[in-house]
Image (spheres, grey):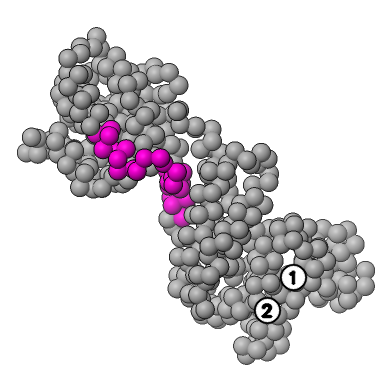
Amino acid sequence: MKFSDFKHLLGADPYSQDPEFLRARNQLGEFAEAAREADDFERHLLAAAAVSPPESLHDDIMRTKFRSRSLALPIAMAASLFLALGALAIMSWNQQRFASLDEYIISHYSHDGQRVERVAANTPVSLQEIEAIMASVGATSDPSLARKIRFLKNCPTPDGKGVHMVLVTESGPVTVIYMPNTTIEEEHGLTLEGKHAWLVALDQGAAALIGDSDEQLQQLQPSIRQGIARNETLAL
Amino acid sequence: MKYDADRSKRFDEVAGQYATDLYRYALWLCGQDALAKDLVQETFLRAWRALDSLKNPAAAKGWLITILRREFARTFERKVPKFTELDKVMVADEPDLGPDEQVGRHQIREGIMRLPVKYREPLMLQIVMGFSCEEIATQLGLTKSAVMTQLFRAREKLKRVLHEDGVTGKVYEIF
């Protein structure tokens, strides 16, 4: 390979895998010197171009999955509709009796779980709303948990009013049904069609977590255990 | 409608693999961190919506860059400021470098940003995104020969800029 062609290729494509170019790289004399200079410059060029990305970049990109511009209904109207339906559901559900807590959770999720998840994907929740609904059952959520909440509403539970939440995780939404007055003897999994669910005991009360995988639920459990606290002075 | 966990997983894999490089490329296009972040988010929003059209995972990198470049041309190009804010982005990036090395890196970065877009863009596609000359030619709608000329001139201009900044002798001696 001619030296002028070699230098041109070093300047245009130092990463070239052309066999003749690679052989020329290994030649002694001016070829080796030119290759060394070019590689040295390239190292500094690569290092300069490799700017550190912002820490929030990955999280911001994950949140793009929950943005949409194509809803037929305004988001606020859809959220209000579900709150209203939730109120009606409380009245009708209070008349029902379930053979077990598991049956209640399965029935509850089948009733509106996936519909709420779909709306929740596009609905941000204000901290004020989170505080108000949690306070209505005498509870609080810490800021770390609150940041994950994309929808919440009051819901009926066998032991009184509870909170139905949808949280965002890296692997998709997770529904949490918080039952502040329920005590369980043993944490266990539930069988829901197409979903994974776990019933966990909290310091006070219990919560059902419903998601796409056990791994997803296991990762979220610490946030739920640490993030929900009961405060009797808040109970209405 | 059941949440599509597979689709979400495919998106997460693509985003995890290419987000950082896309941000770097966007930053070198825009010269401004906030604009680059917006451009990358818009790119991934469009990618999420059109994910089903990506049939071959191996084509994800080129597909994402195509989306980004179109979005840049459509919306962001007119927002690129006259003066860059690279210093704000990059000041915190060099904790382990000595003073001379920091100066040298700053000079190269200034030099990159001073390159005309027709040289900067193919250079960043090559060194940030890792595209071959053939792939760059496809992205930019040029011949391979034209791309190689642009890349050669980009590096030569960069070396000249560094010399004009007061660096004497060979470039690598400043480090």
| Quadrant of the rendering where the C terminus of chain A is positioned | top left
Magenta region includes residue A76 = yes
| Chain where mark 1 sits | B
Measuring from the top left, give residue A187's x and y in whole percent. 29, 21
Q: Which mark is residue B151?
A: 1
Front in this rendered view, residue A189 or B29? B29
Magenta part of the chain: A57-83
Q: Badge 1: how crowded within 10 Å, few (<14), some, or many (20+)?
A: many
Does the rendering let one see residue A65? Answer: yes
- Using the rendered image, report if marks 2 and 1 lie on a common chain: yes
- Badge 2 or badge 1: first in the primary sequence: 1
Q: Identify the residue position indicated by label 2 in the image.
A: B158
Measuring from the top left, give residue A188's x and y in whole percent. 33, 20
Magenta stretch, main secondary structure class: helix
| Quadrant of the rendering where the N terminus of chain A is positioned | bottom right
Residue A111 lies in quadrant: top left
